[in-house]
Image (cartoon, grey):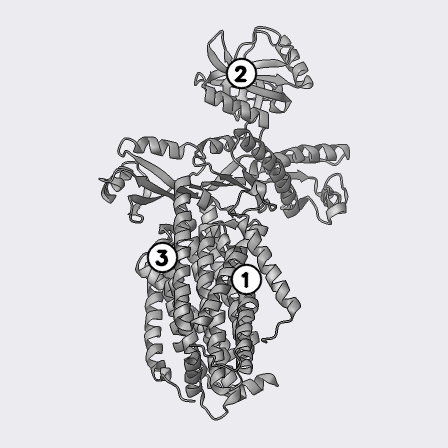
Amino acid sequence: MLYFSRLKIISIIVFCFSLIFFSFSNFVNNEEFFLKKKVNLGLDLQGGSYLLLEVDKNPVINQTLQSKLTQVRNYFKKKEIKTFDYKLGKQVVFFKSDISDQEKILELFKNDNELNPYFDVYKSYQYNVELIDNIFELTLTKYGIIEIEQSLLDQAIEIVRKRVDEVGTNEPSITKSGSNRIAVELPGLDNPDRIKSLLGRTANLTFRFVTQNTDASFGSEKLKDLDTGEELNVSKRIIISGDNLIDAKPQMDNINNETVVSFTLDRLGARKFGRATKNGIGKQLAIVLDNQIISAPVIRDVIASGSGQISGGFTFQSATDLALLLRSGALPAPLDIIEERTVGPDLGEDSIKAGVLSLIIGFILVILYMIYKYRLFGLISNFALIINLFMLLGFLTIFEATLTLPGIAGIILTVGMAVDANVLIFERIKEELKKEKNKVIAFDNGYTLSRTAILDANITTIIAALILFVFGSGPVKGFSVTLSIGILTTLFSVYYIARLLTSIYVIKNKNNEVTIK
Amino acid sequence: MTSKYFFNKYYNLSNIISLILFIISIFFLIFKGLNYGVDFKGGTLIELRSDNTNYKTEDIRGAFNKLNLDDLSVKKFGAESDYVIKFKRSDLNEPDFIKNLKNDLDNYLEDYSFRRVENVGPKVSAELLQDGVTAIAIALAAMLIYIWFRFEWQFSIGAIIAIFHDVIITLGIFSLLSLEINLSIVAAVLTIVGYSMNDTVVIFDRVRENLKKYADIKIFDLTNLSINETLSRTLITSVTTLLALLSIFFFGGEILKGFSFAMILGVILGTYSSIFIANPVLVYFKVSQKTLIKEED
């Protein structure tokens, strides 16, 4: 195992140098360097906020079932099958039919794509129907729910991105996490209060009339007026909604000297708004946001221009936020913040300092100990260790991996454990030297015989690191990344760099006294 | 083939001591339990730094006590005037919570800042705990399977008992000292599993090699021989790993203290158990050359 072909030596040198070269990308100005990559610092090192949001799908499931109820009722009416007693339960629709029709209804739910879609495409249904005590129970199947979750998540992530972008934080990262979650990372942001309040609102805007009588066809509901604090009876009929808005911005209203939000409607919205204001002069128009009335002005004139103002005792900040929410659109479902981690920039800086300091001290201690134990071969091992560290950094740079505080701990641990392979080899060579007179053979045997133990040892550590990578979350994941890459670079540095140097030394001194202390 | 040290003389004694420690640890884990941090229990953690050096922990605690927080704990964190405050919270969605908290706190404290705020909801903390337990369970199973493929089943059992010994006693010490269990401790436990396995495998590798070489040496002496032959490696690697870990413990900052402490315990226990736990198991199973031959048939 001591022989190296010239080609191999050149490859090893080229490989090491290119990785070391990549690692320098972190220390120089990237504009002038050919490689535009750097190791990312995790939020725990550079400071910033991490938010995990969960989409609350239940309201949308209920809405879906509500409209399904209407569809099913109309469907059977058209087919002239008598169904009755429709009722919306918790994530379930109940209805009844004549006993003679029951078979037929179940059959239709199985075969008619209009009534129960998806089967043709997915080989599974959107809805599940069961007959229990002569009552039909219609629920969404697992696939139906997944479909809802996916489209909700896609829409929600779009809106979240718009809102975060509008606030203008530095390089935010917004990613899906699982089937119904969104992870938001905001580097450098040490106070996430504003983002939280922006993401915590659905921003569902509607313009509706305030009515006295309970409107027969649409119904009405009592909503609270935030401005005056009183409750108003508002029609459920929506004149225009946030979807019709194309722009919104905060503005100073010079007449009343207050901040307002001015908005512009699309053509359809402008026409509807014009008609409604024409017919409704003298009526009170409620501007409703997330089931609360912002203001309810009395219509004095026809507004045909398609633009208007919302006033409601705003501060400049709250008007800016409302305009932002209206521009980005309404969330399809409420978002719950289920996890939040914020690290201030000074703590991040302290962590980097502490991490680097402990890395340097740990490194020096290990290096001194190895020289004390093995003298010249300790130097060889240390040289391999230094190259090892640069290669590790080079790999992290190429993959643009995220370095976290536990990640730095992983590097330090790599330093401590990396020498293990060399120790195993050196100890074995010592034993072999006692038995074998030919030094080259003794060294060769030492490498060969220690190989299985080294592989075993490193594979077990890699197994642990990979499991941590799969199940770990946040900064801890960074630990598994540095630890696993560290093991690979360690094996390389031991078997190619340290072995190369050892072989050069041994072959040169094959007739002299060679001892490993 | 003379052994320098007679480790095998102490197999019985060390096993009795380990068994006692193991049982005590189990008792602590059952009756005292672990001190879960917000990662696994849910709630809010605030790392506070006060620039006013006159404040003592009691002052900080007193100020937070006035805010009507559930399950409040206030502890000093590191050498400077840093404190970690933890409490329970039912609703994470209230966006102005921290702002309001600061406003209230301003009445009782001055010159302070929040360096770190962590809120973990009950759903997430339950998942994180489950993931952590699953990860450790899978790691143990993976090690068992790996060593089963590489060695014979007697070795496999020896290694797993040694790992259990290390993990349970480490956690037992955490329970005894009421040290916080958070995500990084899970990482530490997994690394301990890997390290302990690593140490054991190196010795087992030598045991197997020697089994093939010497038919006439009994396993009791054979394990001792193998331990002696690999002893300097075992010690040197433990020393370098401990040097690295001690450096993290003393210079790596407060956040890594728990992690490095767990690892230090794990490395010491792992080194001990690979000698005094894993090897006696081979003796109890009366492993001999026949064991290897049987497997190869």
Extreme bottom residue here?
A: B216
| In front of the other: A337 or B185 | B185
Place of residue A491 in the rendered image (x, y in percent of width and height, measured from the top left): 54, 66
| In front of the other: A161 or A76 | A161
Query: Do callouts 2 and 1 mark residues in contact (Cβ within 8 Å)?
Result: no
Q: What amino acid type is highlighted by mark number 1? A: Thr
Q: What amino acid type is highlighted by mark number 2? A: Ile
| In front of the other: A161 or A235 | A161
| In front of the other: A471 or A208 | A471
Place of residue A205 in the rendered image (x, y in percent of width and height, measured from the top left): 57, 23
Place of residue A39 in the rendered image (x, y in percent of width and height, measured from the top left): 53, 48
A238 lies above or below A397: above
Badge 3 density bin: few <14, some 14–19, many ≥20, Cα 10 Å? many
A7 lies above or below A277: below
Q: CA distance from mark 2 to mark 3?
A: 58 Å
Task: Give the residue pinned by disc 2.
Answer: A310
Q: CA distance from mark 3 to mark 1?
A: 25 Å
Give SS at disc 1. Answer: helix
Q: CA distance from mark 2 to mark 1?
A: 62 Å
Residue in view at x 36 percent, y 70 percent: B22
Q: Is residue B145 visible?
A: no
Indicate which disc residue B249 carries: 3
Which quadrant, please, contains the C terminus of chain A?
A: bottom left
Place of residue A471 in the rendered image (x, y in percent of width and height, measured from the top left): 52, 55
Subunit under mark 3: B
Residue in view at x 60 percent, y 21 percent: A247
Q: Are marks 3 and 1 on the same chain?
A: no
Task: Give the residue pinned by disc 1.
Answer: A489
Give SS at disc 3. Answer: helix
